[in-house]
């Protein structure tokens, strides 16, 4: 006798079909973010000594369109991704989904206001609220996604995403606490200022740990994309290797062209600091790996791989410890895309057994036995 499908199984199949696809306008946001990174940050911070000021302003003005396009497309895609995360049970406990909903209610309105206002009109408090909410959401979603039964590279990447956001949150929180004068924060500030050298070393150490975690996200997702299904694996590695070599060669040429400003460009575009003084060219390796694997993934036939590649490129475009609203959008949206890719690879969900009503829904009505003859 053919076993009938339970309501939960039908709902899970529908959810998986949704999660395998990137949210609406997500790939458009990825492409716009790459143009915004090149025009508004790399060119602006790296070319002042190479081109005249008028040309530099033209490049910055050209970068406004992809930034606005990435903001609009990214907000739409992020809303769809957050609604899917909150809606589908079994992949996250109800308490965590409620917390994500609460912080989303802080971050999304702040992001909308920050997008509508000119950069000079942004209030520091609005940016701090957005920064805190984005890093808390990234940590919560990453801690949830690390439980999914996804490939090892994806699970390592989402764990590193959570560690990166948590380190950024600690550094910013302790930095703000050191400026307090009264209350509990004032006592913490007094304790930290008694030993300023130790406090600075601790903050710098946490920042460097977060930076290493940020780069490990790029490597983990890149390996998951390139080392996927066996058909075409060698071609993927060769293509990504060629793109990596091109990025490294371009970085060396740019270093020779701009000289000492190369370090300023790296910090202004990505906010790196660990190898900035002595080995700034080393950053071309993780960036090249991300660009190579990301472009290879965007050309894949599988929608799940394209979604994973979009998350990789958005994570790179966000940079480490982002502090502007558009980069915070990249950070959270990248985490959502990678989390959805891991979620789609776990049909049951690790929290299914914690929802008793789902087991009731999964029960099928037993067939009636035929009446017996009297």
Image: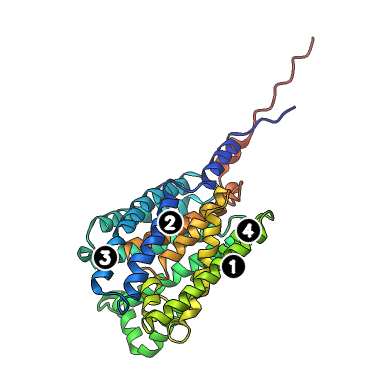
Residue at the spot of label 3? 58
Q: Quadrant of residue 129?
A: bottom left
Secondary structure type for disc 1: helix
- Numbered badge on residue 32: none
Residue at the spot of label 1? 241
Q: Quadrant of residue 325?
A: bottom left
Q: Please give the name of the residue rendered at 36% of the width and 62% of the height, measured from the top-left corner.
A: 36
Crowding at mark 1 (Cα within 10 Å: few <14, some 14-19, many 20+)? some
Callout in the foreground (2, 4): 2
Crowding at mark 4 (Cα within 10 Å: few <14, some 14-19, many 20+)? some
- Viewer-closest of 277 and 248: 248
Mark 3–mark 2 Cα distance, whole angstroms, equals 23 Å
Callout in the foreground (3, 2): 3
Q: Is residue 261 above or below residue 18?
A: below
Q: Please give the name of the residue rendered at 29% of the width and 57% of the height, measured from the top-left corner.
A: 110
Residue 156 visible? The answer is no
Q: Of callouts 4 and 3, which one flags the residue occurring earlier in the amino acid sequence?
A: 3
In the picture, which quadrant includes the C terminus? Answer: top right
Q: Are marks 2 and 4 in contact (CB under 8 Å)?
A: no
Q: Of callouts 2 and 4, which one flags the residue occurring earlier in the amino acid sequence?
A: 2
Q: Is residue 114 above or below residue 247?
A: above
Residue at the spot of label 4? 151
Mark 1–mark 3 Cα distance, whole angstroms, equals 33 Å
Mark 2–mark 1 Cα distance, whole angstroms, equals 21 Å
Crowding at mark 2 (Cα within 10 Å: few <14, some 14-19, many 20+)? many
Asked whether, in this view, residue 118 is left or right of residue 197, the answer is left
Horizontal and vertical percent position of residue 353: 60, 47
- Viewer-closest of 331 and 188: 331
């Amino acid at each position: 006798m053919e076993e009938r499908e339970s309501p939960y199984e039908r709902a899970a199949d529908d959810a998986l079909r949704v999660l395998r696809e990137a949210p609406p306008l997500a790939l458009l946001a990825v492409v716009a973010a790459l143009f915004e990174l090149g025009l508004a940050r790399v060119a602006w911070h790296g070319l002042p000594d190479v081109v005249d000021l008028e040309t530099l302003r033209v490049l910055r003005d050209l970068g406004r369109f992809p930034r606005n396009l990435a903001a609009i497309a990214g907000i739409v895609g992020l809303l769809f991704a957050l609604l899917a995360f909150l809606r589908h049970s079994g992949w996250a406990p109800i308490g965590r989904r409620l917390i994500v909903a609460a912080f989303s209610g802080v971050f999304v309105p702040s992001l909308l206001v920050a997008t509508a206002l000119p950069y000079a009109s942004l209030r520091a408090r609005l940016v701090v609220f957005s920064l805190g909410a984005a890093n808390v959401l990234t940590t919560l979603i990453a801690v949830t996604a690390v439980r999914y039964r996804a490939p090892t590279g994806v699970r390592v990447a989402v764990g590193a995403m959570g560690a990166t956001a948590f380190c950024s949150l600690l550094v910013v929180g302790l930095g703000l606490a050191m400026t307090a004068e009264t209350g509990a924060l004032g006592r913490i500030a007094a304790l930290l200022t008694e030993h300023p050298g130790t406090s600075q070393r601790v903050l710098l150490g946490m920042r460097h740990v977060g930076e290493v975690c940020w780069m490990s996200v790029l490597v983990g997702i890149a390996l998951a994309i390139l080392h996927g299904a066996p058909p075409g694996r060698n071609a993927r590695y060769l293509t990504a290797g060629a793109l990596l070599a091109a990025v490294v060669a371009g970085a060396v040429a740019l270093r020779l062209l701009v000289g000492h400003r190369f370090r300023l460009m790296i910090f202004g575009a990505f906010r790196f600091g660990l190898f900035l003084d002595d080995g700034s060219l080393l950053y071309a390796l993780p960036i090249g790996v991300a660009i190579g694997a990301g472009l290879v993934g965007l050309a894949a036939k599988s929608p799940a791989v394209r979604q994973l590649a979009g998350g990789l490129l958005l994570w790179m475009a966000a940079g480490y410890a982002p502090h502007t609203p558009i980069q915070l959008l990249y950070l959270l949206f990248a985490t959502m895309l990678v989390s959805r890719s891991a979620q789609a690879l776990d049909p049951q969900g690790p929290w299914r057994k914690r929802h008793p009503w789902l087991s009731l829904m999964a029960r099928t009505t037993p067939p009636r036995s035929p009446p017996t003859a009297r």
